[in-house]
Amino acid sequence: MRDTFKNRRIDTLFVLVVFCVFTVSVLIVLMFGANIYQNMTDISREEQDERTTLAYIWTRVKSNDSAGTVSVGEFNGISALFYDELSEDRMFRTAIYLYDGWVRELFSDIELDLPPASGVPIMQLDDLLFEEIEYGLIRVSSGTRSLLIYPRGSLDITR
């Protein structure tokens, strides 16, 4: 009788150990799965932010694009895209640039020298670069994505 009771305790202990190993295995798999899901979500969000920012810039340029008004340059040492417009006999400039982790847009009188922090934050982003390639073609790069913009009236083959 004693042997039967001892065998049942060993059987019960074995079942509990197997159950604990199974439970720990399930928890480890769930933790890895949650971590992978979080990483994929972060990557997807960053890519979506890049696509949205590039679409925003393209839309802003194309909606305000008239011959010779779009240019690339530096705004207080920061790569920026500018477009100028004449309103009520005054020149205004809009600058789009990346400052302090935010894509910002600053609309001001062309004569004013405002600091980069004055711009309106549009979207958080890690990387944004504007460069004029040739013949007025502008490349906007963000992370792994880039966009080519060809503003109106920018074909100048004499350069």
Image: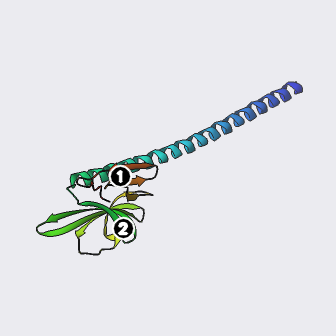
Q: Amino acid at mark 1?
A: Thr
Residue occupying the point 38% across, 58% down: 131
The image quarter containing residue 4 is: top right
Image quadrant for the N terminus?
A: top right
Per the image, label 1 sits on a secondary structure element best described as: helix
Residue 100 image offset from top left, x and y in percent: 42, 66
Q: Which mark is residue 74?
A: 2
Query: Is residue 105 rendered to the left or right of residue 102?
Result: left
> As rendered, which of 157 and 31 lies closer to the eye?
157
The image quarter containing residue 29 is: top right
Image quadrant for the C terminus?
A: bottom left
Per the image, label 2 sits on a secondary structure element best described as: strand
Q: Compared with residue 144, is residue 108 higher up or lower down, i.e. above or below?
A: below
Residue occupying the point 60% across, 42% down: 32
Q: Compared with residue 24, is residue 106 higher up or lower down, i.e. above or below?
A: below
Query: Is residue 115 rendered to the left or right of residue 20?
Result: left
- Looking at this rendering, what residue extends furthest in the front direction? 158
> As rendered, which of 1 and 55 lies closer to the eye?
55
Query: Is residue 44 rendered to the left or right of residue 60?
Result: right
The image quarter containing residue 121 is: bottom left
Residue occupying the point 37% across, 72% down: 76
Tell me which colouring the rendered structure shows.
rainbow
Q: Earlier in the sequence, mark 1 or mark 2?
A: 1
Q: CA distance from mark 1 to mark 2?
A: 19 Å
